[in-house]
Image (spheres, grey):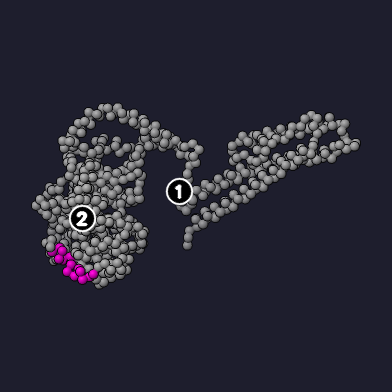
Amino acid sequence: MMDYDFKIKTSNERSKVEDLFDYEGCKVGRGTYGHVYKARRKDGSDTRDYALKQIEGTGLSMSACREIALLRELKHSNVINLIGVILSHNDRKVWLLFDYAEHDLWAMIKFHRAANNKKPVMPKGMVKSVLYQIFAGIQYLHSNWVFHRDLKPANILVMGEGIERGRVKIADMGFARLFNNPLKPLADLDPVVVTFWYRAPELLLGARHYTKAIDIWAIGCIFAELLTSEPIFHCRQEDIKTSNPYHHDQLDRIFSVMGFPLEKDWEDIRKMPEHPTLLKDFKRSNYSNSSLVKYMDRHKIKPDSKAFHLLQKLLLMDPNKRITSEQAMQDAFFQEDPLPTQDVFSGCQIPYPKREFLTDDDQDDKADTNKRQNPTNNGAQQSDQGSHGHNAKRVRLSGAPGTVMSVQQQDQQTQQQQQQQSQQQQQQQVQQQQQQAQQQAYKKPANKRREPRRHTLQNGIDYNMLKRMKQIELERDILMQGLAAVEKAKDWYTKQISGVQEKMKYLGRMGSHTDQWSEAQQERIELQRARVLEVNRHLGMLTDSTERGGLPLHMNLAMHHPLPHLSATAAPTTHMLNRLKQQNHILSEEVNQKNDRITTLEREKAGLLREVYQNRIPQK
């Protein structure tokens, strides 16, 4: 039985996120799985900034469980660091605590893409440092048998000022999976992974046996975007949530840049599940003038440059021909000056603006504006905004979290300060009400049977099955005790029947001892009455006992149909004999019923034992 008092005590002693961190009004983004806030510790133990990620909904989703499990095991300088997990008992929310990253590649590329920016592309040294650190993080994941499966600029964070200035962090492990060697096919609902713009062609053609080369393709797309400041394979995203991996427009965009794949370029393309659909929807002649060389040349990336050679190795149609992350880190592109550094902003000030804090109205307005003004890019920008989300343009804050610089927000803050005293007085009342509500919620409902736990199979043993076997043994013991009591009562009634029958042989005959009835027979009748009272007392004691698994049938008979009390002048009659025989017959029936029940329980126990032994014997 659960100790509800202990549960209430532990829940009250558990640290609450609102008591530990100051994050109100400091939302920096909203992703597929929840909100992200910039936070600082209230106790002032350090001045670091943290990222608080609130998981959407109540409880833990499978994606959140997967992300937590992986991040607890993965420790690398280029992988986001999970500091802790905080459970909010009142609203059943889950909070993930990360190191705070001030920038991400999505915002940095957007900064260079702006029309009024004098630097339309990212500096070469910065591109090289960013790309090298991405490869270092992915090489660590792949060496630990982990696919990321959702690499995109929004999930590549860059640390701001501080100890890890300019350090790249791979974030958002919600789609990450462990893989084995050899690779196994994934579930039927798994193919739709990775944002469409960064999705490898084998995924778009329905491959279920894909490899870590899908992450290499995504890095190639990011590399091209860093060089040109625009997505290389952007297309419409109207069916971003479809369960069908095949996407005609995305394939058309890839072929428009890369050209239609020939069988010599991709030997296993015929094995793709969507290959018949591909031949039906596309004509090779429509893409005869398309090539990666022409596309990059339009963006002033020469085909003889080392950057282009590396990009070409990353964006090969055949996943078996793509280079690995380890090979990419040894490429000549990283051997020439400027060499990659751990600080992507090395030698210069950070040119990118800090994250802006959002309000709920801002996000709604931003979503509506994107839908009206930019329907082509709407899906990708709203699909999943990474661990720290994207920037907004309404409320600009600077300094410590919660310091609002706009006039409207300053007025609101002034009103809040005036009401702060009254709110503090009300907090105690609210906490008391919450504690009372928790106590009522934890009270066990009356006359309600607790449902058995579903997940009880551990180490090959079903503990629900063992619990049922113990119940069977207990019920069997109770039935055996009741059976012994019934047998004892039956023996007594049999003796009484024999005695009455013996008396009736001589009753009413000539020469019988009728003269001595008043003395000898009266003594026997009194003895019989005393025995009847003793049996009734014994049955009453059994009735009051709640440890025998219920009221046996002979107890009910003793209570509702007691033996007739014989008077001083009464004599044994045929009616008395019939009553005794009736009682004996009923007791015999009860004995048979209990024996049948014991047999049934023995069969059930044998079946359970068989199932336990089968589960514990390893399969050959």
Labels in figure, total: 2
Q: Which residue has dot 2 on it? A: 376
Question: Distance between the Cα atoms at labels 2 and 1?
Answer: 46 Å
Magenta span main SS: helix
The image quadrant of residue 440 is: top left
Mark 2: amino acid: Thr
Of label 2 and label 1, which has the lower sequence position?
2
Q: Is residue 484 above or below residue 258?
A: above
Q: Is residue 290 left or right of residue 616?
A: left
- Who's the residue at 48% across and 42% down the image? 450
Amino acid type at mark 1: Arg
At x 36%, y 59%, the residue is 188
Q: Nearer the viewer, residue 497 or 95?
A: 497
Question: Where are the magenta residues, as a range?
Answer: 283-297
Measured from the top left, where is residue 528 in percent x and y? 76, 34
Marks 2 and 1 in Cβ contact (< 8 Å): no
Image location of residue 166, percent across then percent down: 18, 49
Tell me which corner region of the image, top left, top right, bottom left or bottom right, holds residue 356: top left
- Outermost residue on the bottom side: it is 264
